[in-house]
Every structure is written in structure tokens, then in C-alpha cells.
């Protein structure tokens, strides 16, 4: 057989497989792979009143055979074809070593099928046990990952780590759920058991549409859109360096009890959460002054960029609450690639086509001003609170640079003049970089009104394969 014949045969096989996947209409509760053997149970299941393809590995610590992997891949292709979310429940110690390359090849088909789903249908993964070796990388392809307390995930296990590095390390320390919640950002949430994990996934999916061509589902709420929220502004300390929990500000603005934070323990200097405003699902991105004064570092840039990209993929408007003195300084961060990773957040915002509303709560300095969805990045509405400070840097920093040889009295006078002339939102408003300076109590009303106006926002995408994301 020639190379051309081989390609044609593979193409025919793929066409035939696709035709099988597109079979009769799917029925909730229908087993999709019941007669295929293997260790996967795939069904169309109802979660929170909506259909999803639910693919579960049956048993604890299953070795992924070629059959099992093909079942997972088939489930992903069905979710893509039927335009419904894919939910995978994983507990696997990796590809079947005894079976060899067929198992490895089949695992690659799962990765390819999930990649095809990415940005088309939401992908959620539940880890209830081990997720080891290559299959652990599937978690990185999922939009949402929920791990149970006793689960763990890593590409190379303790034995390999000790052989290559000489370091004796335990399973929990290497890849426990707590570490993935705190240090790696793999886990969107960590819960007690499988049932709680499924419930959490259900709650998360409630904010997302079934697929890219659908709008997020609106919900009925008893919270009036024109409710004033004076408590939001009252949470800001009188001192520009005072700390506060921005989650309380967000809770005051969004619908009551609607804020659902993702990855709360990773990169705590930025908050990413789902919420609703006037019943409309939104994504919330907010600097967190409680941690690192709300500065941006590498994990915060990665966390926010991935969240913004997910919201944009699934048509969720983005509300950005800004209070940051800039990027966190340090040799270590620069050497680890602050330029590349900081650019990820710039890139994510700049290419987002969903409605975008920015509210400057207090400080917005330097490059971080641009990065946090400024008017320059293309937001649809930029609001500022009256005491907001928009500048290249704070008065103290400016004095340290421009008044190095000045006396203390001269520096104090410079700082006072600098703050009066430049550290206010009206300078930016005069130039059209802030659309309105508002009373904090009116923030919810203004955002809700903007979301209604922007509900029909559409942008014509550039005809290109894709951009070169600064990974």
C-alpha cells in the first residue's frame, strides 16, 4: 500500500467513525459505550436540568487500555457533535504498561478529541483518585477541574522523581489535591467526595452555555437591577495603602449569593469568579489587595488570562474590578518570564470580543493599568470611583525618582502637588479613557444597564488561523 493509499484509508475510517458518532438522537440516561467493553461508562446525563456527556472510569486506579481510551475519545466526539458539555470522571494510574503502544496511542486520541472540544463545548474534569502520567495532562485541557480531598495527580510519580533527582517525596506532597489548589492552579475547586464534585461541576456549568454558539442561560433573581450598593464603596479604607477583601466588594455588586470563585487558593492576589448581575451570568476578574497588595505576578497573570479566555470562548461578559499598584518587582519574577506571562493577560483581554466592563475601584498604576482591561485594550465601558488613582506610578514612587536630591520638605510638597494634579480619575476622563466617574453606590445599576445595552454586541473576527498566544 502506498502512502497515499494509507492516508485515504485513514480518512475513510475517520469518516465512518464520525458517521457512527452522529447516530440517532441521544436520550438522557442512554449508555453510549455499554457494548464496547473497557472500563468507561459513558452516558448522556442530566446535570442541573441540562444534558451533558458524562464519561466515568469504572473502578479506582484504572489502567487506561486502548479500548478505554477510545471510549473516552468517543464520548468527547459525541459531546462535540451534539454540542453539549463534556464531563469526565477520572481515576487512572496511566496508560496500560502491559498493552504498550496501542494504549499510548489511544490516550493520544483522547487528548486530540478534547482539544477539538476546546472552546466549542465546556469541558469539566472530576478527579476522584489518581490521575497519573500522560492522562494527568488531560486536566490541563479541561476548562474546569474539581478534585476530591484524597485525589492526586502528577506526570511523574515519586519513584521517577527519586530515580532522577534523588529526592524522596510522598504522593500527597508531590501531587495532592491541596497542592494543586494552592501551588499549581490545576484544581478549580477541591471538595470532599465524588458526589460533592459532581454537584460543584453542576454549579459551575450553570453559568456557561451548552456550546460556543449559545448564550449563557439567564436566571430569575429577586435582586433588583437598580439596587444601590453603598456598602461596596464603604469597604475601601481611607488610606490608599489600606487592605480590604475585594470579594466583599464583588458580592455587593453582583446578585445576592451568586458569586462562585474559581481557584480561590492559587494566585490569591487576583480573584476570578462566576456571578450573575440582573440574572445575566458574567465572569468577574478582580485584584485582591489582601494578598501582595493586589500586585500582578506570574501566577496571577496566568490565572486571569485563562479565565478571561474561557469567558470569551463561552460568551460570558467580563466585569473587571481594578485596584493594583502594578506588577510585583523582583529578579526572580523577571528571570522566570514576567514579560511573557504578563503578556498572556494583555493578549487575553485584547482579543476578547464579549462585553467588557471595567471599574477602577482605587489604584491603577503603570503597565498594570493597561493590562487590567483598560480602554486601550478595547473595553466597552470604563467606570471609576471618585477617589480612583490613575497614573504611571504613585506619588511616593514618583518623588523617589524625580526628587532624589530634594529635601524632605520639597519631596513632601512634590508628592502633594503630584497627587492633586494627577492622581484622580478626571484627568483620564477628560481624555476619554474613563467613560464616567460614578458614585460607588450606583455601580451595580450602571453595570446592569450596560449589560442590557451590550447584550447584542457582535464583533467580526479577523480571518486568520489563530494568533500566536504568548504561552
Image (tube, rainbow, N blue to C red):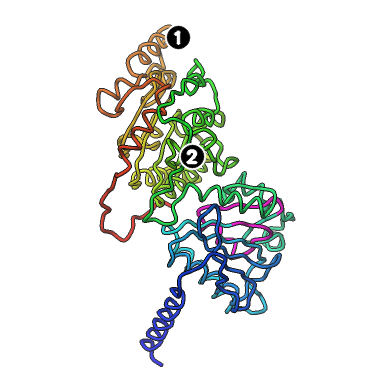
Instruction: Count all numbered tags in the image, as a single digit.
Output: 2
The x and y percentages for residue 246 are 52, 29
Residue at 53%, 63% (x, y): give it.
Answer: 53
Q: Which mark is residue 408?
A: 1
Query: Quadrant where the N terminus lies?
Result: bottom left
Helix, strand, or loop for circle 2? strand
Q: Which residues are magenta?
A: 126-150
| Label 2 or label 1, whichever comes before in sequence order | 2
The x and y percentages for residue 183 are 61, 45
Q: Which mark is residue 275?
A: 2
Indicate whether residue 146 is drawn in magenta.
yes
**Dot 2 alpha-carbon crowd within 10 angstroms: few under 14, some 14 to 19, many 20 or more:** many
**Dot 1 alpha-carbon crowd within 10 angstroms: few under 14, some 14 to 19, many 20 or more:** few
- From this view, report whether residue 35 is shown above or below residue 371: below
Residue at 46%, 60% (x, y): give it.
Answer: 84
- From this view, report whether residue 32 is shown above or below residue 179: below
Residue 63 picture quarter: bottom right
User: Farthest top residue?
Assistant: 409
- From this view, report whether residue 155 is shown above or below residue 254: below
Decide if residue 430 is on the left or right side of residue 80. Answer: left
Indicate whether residue 81 is drawn in magenta.
no
Task: Identify which residue, 360 or 194, lies in the foreground.
Answer: 194
Residue at 34%, 41% (x, y): give it.
Answer: 355
Decide if residue 83 is on the left or right side of residue 204. Answer: left
Front tag of 2 and 1 = 2
The x and y percentages for residue 30 are 56, 69
User: Farthest bottom residue?
Assistant: 1
Helix, strand, or loop for circle 1? helix
Work out how far the residue at label 2 is from the one at label 1, CA to CA, in angstroms.
Answer: 48 Å
Task: Identify which residue, 339 or 59, lies in the foreground.
Answer: 59
The x and y percentages for residue 23 are 45, 75
Task: Identify which residue, 253 or 309, lies in the foreground.
Answer: 253
Amino acid at each position: 500500500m502506498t502512502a497515499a493509499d494509507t492516508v485515504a484509508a485513514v480518512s475513510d475510517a475517520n469518516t465512518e467513525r464520525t458517521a457512527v458518532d452522529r447516530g440517532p438522537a441521544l436520550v438522557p440516561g442512554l449508555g453510549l459505550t455499554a457494548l464496547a467493553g473497557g472500563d468507561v461508562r459513558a452516558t448522556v446525563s442530566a446535570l442541573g436540568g441540562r444534558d451533558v456527556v458524562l464519561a466515568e472510569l469504572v473502578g479506582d486506579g484504572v489502567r487506561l487500555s486502548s479500548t478505554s481510551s477510545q471510549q473516552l475519545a468517543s464520548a468527547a466526539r459525541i459531546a462535540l457533535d451534539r454540542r453539549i458539555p463534556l464531563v469526565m470522571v477520572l481515576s487512572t494510574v496511566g496508560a496500560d504498561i502491559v498493552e504498550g503502544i496501542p494504549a499510548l496511542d489511544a490516550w493520544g486520541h483522547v487528548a486530540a478529541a478534547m482539544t477539538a472540544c476546546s472552546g466549542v463545548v465546556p469541558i469539566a474534569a472530576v478527579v476522584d483518585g489518581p490521575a497519573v502520567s500522560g492522562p494527568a495532562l488531560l486536566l490541563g485541557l479541561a476548562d474546569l477541574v474539581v478534585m476530591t480531598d484524597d485525589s492526586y495527580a502528577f506526570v511523574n510519580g515519586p519513584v521517577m522523581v527519586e530515580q532522577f533527582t534523588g529526592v524522596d517525596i510522598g504522593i500527597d506532597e508531590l501531587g495532592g489535591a491541596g497542592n494543586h489548589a494552592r501551588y499549581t492552579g490545576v484544581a478549580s475547586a477541591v471538595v470532599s467526595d465524588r458526589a460533592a464534585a459532581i454537584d460543584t461541576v453542576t454549579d459551575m456549568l450553570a453559568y456557561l452555555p451548552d456550546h460556543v454558539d449559545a448564550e449563557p442561560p439567564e436566571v430569575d433573581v429577586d435582586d433588583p437591577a437598580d439596587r444601590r450598593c453603598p456598602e461596596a464603596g464603604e469597604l475601601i479604607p481611607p488610606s490608599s495603602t489600606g487592605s480590604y477583601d475585594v470579594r466583599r466588594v464583588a458580592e455587593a455588586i453582583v446578585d445576592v449569593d451568586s458569586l462562585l470563585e474559581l481557584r480561590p487558593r492559587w494566585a490569591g492576589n487576583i480573584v476570578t469568579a462566576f456571578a450573575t448581575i440582573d440574572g445575566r451570568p458574567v465572569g468577574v476578574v478582580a485584584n485582591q489587595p489582601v494578598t501582595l497588595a493586589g500586585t500582578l505576578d506570574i501566577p496571577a497573570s496566568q490565572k486571569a488570562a485563562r479565565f478571561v479566555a474561557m469567558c470569551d470562548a463561552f460568551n460570558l461578559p467580563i466585569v473587571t474590578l481594578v485596584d493594583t499598584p502594578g506588577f510585583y518587582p523582583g529578579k526572580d519574577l523577571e528571570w522566570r518570564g514576567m514579560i511573557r506571562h504578563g503578556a498572556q493577560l494583555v493578549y487575553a483581554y485584547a482579543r476578547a470580543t464579549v462585553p467588557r466592563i471595567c471599574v477602577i475601584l482605587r489604584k491603577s498604576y503603570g503597565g498594570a493599568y493597561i493590562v487590567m482591561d483598560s480602554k486601550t485594550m478595547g473595553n466597552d465601558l470604563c467606570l471609576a470611583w471618585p477617589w480612583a488613582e490613575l497614573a504611571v506610578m504613585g506619588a511616593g514612587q514618583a518623588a523617589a525618582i524625580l526628587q532624589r536630591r530634594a529635601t524632605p520638605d520639597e519631596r513632601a510638597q512634590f508628592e502633594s502637588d503630584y497627587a492633586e494634579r494627577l492622581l484622580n480619575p478626571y484627568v483620564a476622563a477628560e481624555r476619554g479613557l474613563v467613560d464616567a466617574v460614578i458614585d460607588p453606590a450606583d455601580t451595580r445599576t450602571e453595570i446592569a444597564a450596560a449589560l442590557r445595552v451590550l447584550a447584542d454586541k457582535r464583533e467580526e473576527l479577523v480571518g486568520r488561523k489563530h494568533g500566536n498566544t504568548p504561552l
